[in-house]
Image (cartoon, grey):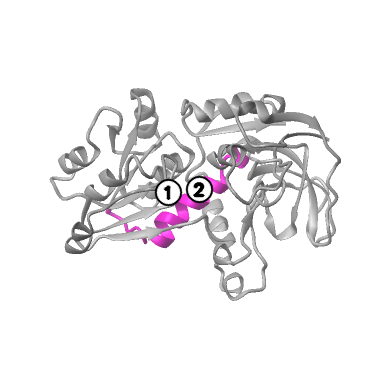
Amino acid sequence: MKAVRFHEHGGLDVLRYEDVDDPEPAPGEVLIKVRACALNHLDLWQRRGIPGVPLPHCPGSDIAGEVVRGEAPGVAEGLRVMLQPGISCGRCGACLGGQDNLCRSYGLVGHQWEGGYAEFVTVPVENLIALPDRIGFVEAAAFPLTFLTAWHMLVTRAQLRPGETVLVLAAGSGVGQAAIQVARAQGARVIATAGSVEKLVRARELGAHVGINHYQDDIAKEVRLFTDRRGVDVVVEHVGQSTWEQSVKSLRRGGRLVTCGATSGPNGSVDIRHLFTRQISLIGSYMGSKGELLQAADLFFDGEFGPAVDRTYSLEAAAEAQQRLEDKAQFGKIVLEL
């Protein structure tokens, strides 16, 4: 089969479009013909050299396609599916308690395992989610990781309530565009930031009530203006170092900051006195459970929300696709279409 892999860490030039042996499904696994695979920042970090990535490596955690073969009840050849990206042991207390993303052996397709920058991939049968006929492969591939992340952040961890106000940073990112829609589905008011007028217009089209240009404006000052100096109830923080201080300052007394990433850097500082006197909660969030993805997928399949797809590329043009993601030129998800 054809696949895009890197044999060493580095820039875009280390990505190779090459011939690789077809994978063989182990017991309990199925072989999937990949029809679409969406990009994530994780793909860039892997290529650059984050720990835990075996070499050579084929990235890609967001996958949609068709079942080729595998022995499992109700899983027929040709079944159209999207994949739950998280893999866990299935036996520990966290897994059996419906919190598989807390499993000690939790990992991701396309990170610890080979991913979807390839014509075929193997996954455990329990990672399959059957697709309705009306959902296309590109749209399906753009959904799982970012909407699961946003759902876990807002619904499970922050326990967002109707009528609350949410600040969503970087609305043009995968997590950003998903968080706007999840927050709106929960009945919240959304303030979104982006780096251009065009992206702010797109954010409003997805449901944001207010937009802030994070390159030109003081985020916390603008938030205070829009909330009558009160601040927001929840901040969706996934940018990290460059926005951390502004995120904390944007919260109301008793507000919650929920974080899932550090794209701009891992070191954020906070005045601890500000933290305890204003009774602010800092909440970590990582991925989400299989059950949560099914909950979010039900709304996706019913047309309540869905991913914003920026652009599609061929598998052979994966380096060009990653370049667009590195340049922060996209709004929503970039997808490889096979």
Residue 187 x/y as whole percent: 34, 52
Q: Earlier in the sequence, mark 2 or mark 1?
A: 2
Q: Residues within 10 Å of mark 1 (few under 14, many from 20)?
A: many
Q: Work out how far the residue at label 2 is from the one at label 1, CA to CA, in angstroms.
A: 8 Å
Quarter location, residue 256: bottom left
Quarter location, residue 86: bottom right
- Look at label 2 and name its amino acid: Phe
Towards the viewer: 170 or 338:
170
Residue 41 x/y as whole percent: 53, 39
Looking at the rendered structure, the secondary structure element under dot 2 is helix
Looking at the rendered structure, the secondary structure element under dot 1 is helix
69 relative to 8 in the view: left or right: right
Query: Would residue 142 be counted in the magenta stretch?
Result: yes
Residue 25 lies, with reference to residue 312, above or below; the image says below
Q: Which residue is mark 1?
A: 182
Residue 155 x/y as whole percent: 41, 58
Q: Are marks 2 and 1 in contact (CB under 8 Å)?
A: yes
Towards the viewer: 338 or 161:
338
| Residue drawn at x 48%, y 43% as measured from the top left | 305
Towards the viewer: 211 or 275:
275
Query: Would residue 300 be counted in the magenta stretch?
Result: no
Which secondary structure type mostly characterizes the magenta part of the structure? helix
Q: Which residue is mark 2?
A: 147
| Residue drawn at x 85%, y 42% as measured from the top left | 22
The reply to whether residue 302 is visible in this rendering is: no
Quarter location, residue 99: bottom right
Range shown magenta: 139-164
| Residue drawn at x 74%, y 58% as measured from the top left | 125
Q: Residues within 10 Å of mark 2 (few under 14, many from 20)?
A: many
Residue 104 x/y as whole percent: 59, 67
| Residue drawn at x 22%, y 55% as measured from the top left | 271
